[in-house]
Amino acid sequence: MSNTPHTLGEEFPGQLDAIHALKAKDEAFARLLDEYDEVNDRIHKAESRIEPVSDEAEVAFRKRRLAIKDAIAAALAAA
């Protein structure tokens, strides 16, 4: 398991089976999950100063992560 905070398992506890099922049948949802992981990793690297970015860029990443998380939640609710 990753030591990166805000993993999908933490953000959607008890819904990993639903996430995996939806990912298997919905290519757009699978891309959304990939994008979430990518943005989340960039935030983690910025926070831990592995790959520092400007404050504005970090805020933009956080806003994008939240928007993706909202889209994931909406897709799970509609499934």
Image: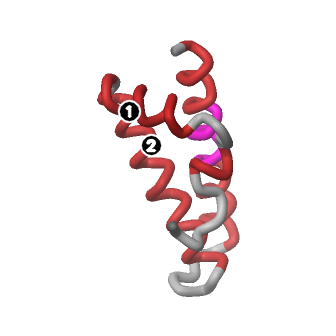
Q: Residue at x 56, y 24 (%)?
A: 76
State the scheme by which the image is colored: secondary structure
Check residue 5 for magenta coloring: no
Q: Answer whether labels 1 and 2 touch (C-beta < 8 Å).
A: yes
Dot 1 or dot 2: first in sequence order is 1
Q: Quadrant of residue 55?
A: bottom right
Name the residue nearer the viewer: 35 or 58.
35
Q: Which residues are magenta?
A: 64-70
Q: Quadrant of residue 48?
A: bottom right
Name the residue nearer the viewer: 23 or 60.
23
Q: Residue at x 65, y 38 (%)?
A: 14
**Residue 23 — which label?**
1
Q: Residue at x 51, y 57 (%)?
A: 39
Give x and y (percent) for residue 32.
43, 38
Mark 1, Cα crowd under 10 Å, few <14 / some 14-19 / many 20+, is some
The residue under label 1 is which amino acid type? Lys
The residue at which mark 2 appears reads as 33
